[in-house]
Amino acid sequence: MQAADRLKENFHPMKLPIIAGQPSWVLRSDQVEAAVTRTGGHLGPVKFRLGRRVVRPFHVAPWAEEATPGLPNILRVLRGDFFCLPFGGNGTPWKGERHPAHGQTANAVWQFLGAEDEGETRSLDLGLNTTIRQARIEKLIQLRQGHTAVYCRHVIRGAAGPMNPGHHAMLEFPAGGSGGRISTSPIGFGQVYPGQFEDPAQGGYSSLKRGAEFRALDRVPLAAGGFADLTRYPAREGFEDLVMVSAKPGGDFAWSAAVFSEEGYVWFSLKDPRVLASTVLWHSHGGRHYPPWNGRHRRVLALEEVTSHFHDGLAESAAKNPVNARGIPTAIRLSPRRPTVVNVIMGVAAVPKGFDVVKTIERKDGGILLRGSAGHRVPVPLDWKFLYGG
């Protein structure tokens, strides 16, 4: 049997291993092992090798291996990162379209299209035909030898009209650790979710001041008065909060980062802000006491790269709203004549002792350069040009 045939045989849907309760494809390079669920196409768990150690920054829901009858797929599978089309709750229909939470792309069963193991590249190709808004979605998950990163590409074909895409990456900070430091590209606009994110009558609690605007993550108004520092996490135990920040306009490169201080590494996400204009930060630290959360979903921080009106969904994002009135797009327009490509890169890098927070990420030949606030410089091999391909 040829190597290509063996690779295809290993990815046969009937032979997929069960990982954290879900049949999953597994893609491997010398530095990364990444699982992708057949249902929903969720990326996770992911193991990154940093020298002699392995780190696992992505979150998997605590009920992943429990019997969860009646739960929608998005919650039953919940882990790592997943592609949302449309992003958000989607409680309000848009012109007759009633999408599930985070879209069919995060809930439906994906089809295996192919896998490649060529030279320095390992790749998995999946496909999905959406029916609520008819489209062909192609998912590429790619690893590169020597790179501690996952390259993700989604191509949308055949659909027309407004749409709010997003990636929903979730990180989990170890219990009992010192936590981490969070940073993003320079912020042009920041706001706490203006609606009711959690309802105490239903057992959900939030701590930030509803609708408050801010210029920096380290000074965000609290509902009870004073300010929260959102550059430090975990924090505000017993609460769920959601904010959105948008990159300063005019650039073609933006990033989010989380330094796992005690563990000595950084997780980062890179994007083209002309495609994904904003970042939604969901702080989930035990503030939901209704099923399946039951107060046990803790120390989770989602850094969600989106073009959306917060997590509301397509109807709110496609309509006129206070965010797009500021010139910040909350939806893109799909054309049946031209594919739409959404790319992100998510990776990790070891950082030296004393590297507290990422101040900048710069593109260099052959990679990126992370700069810390104390002057540390960490070069990372990476193909950032992937963001502009496809």
Image (spheres, rainbow, N blue to C red):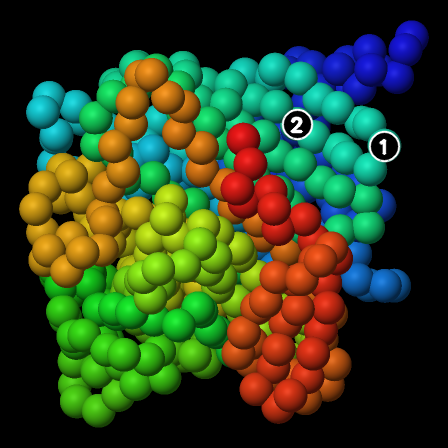
**Residue 374 higher or lower than 50, as above or below:** below
**Residue 257 higher or lower than 232, as above or below:** above
**Residue 326 higher or lower than 211, as above or below:** above
Say what secondary structure mark 1 lies in.
loop
Q: Residue at x 66, y 27 (%)?
A: 124
Q: Residue at x 44, y 63 (%)?
A: 301
Between 192 and 390, the one lying in front of the other is: 390
Q: Is residue 280 visible?
A: no
- Of the 4 image quadrants, the one containing the N terminus is top right
Say what secondary structure mark 2 lies in.
strand
Question: Residue placed farthest to the right in the image?
Answer: 1
Residue 178 found in image quarter: bottom right
The residue where tag 1 is placed is 119
Q: Amino acid at mark 1?
A: Gly
**Residue 359 higher or lower than 318, as above or below:** below
Q: Nearer the viewer, mark 2 or mark 1?
A: 1
- Please rate how many residues cluster around mark 2, counting C-alpha atoms within 10 Å: few if below 14, some from 14 to 19, many from 20: many
* 205 left or right, relative to 281: left
Numbered label attached to residue 124: 2
Numbered label attached to residue 153: none
- Please rate how many residues cluster around mark 1, counting C-alpha atoms within 10 Å: few if below 14, some from 14 to 19, many from 20: few
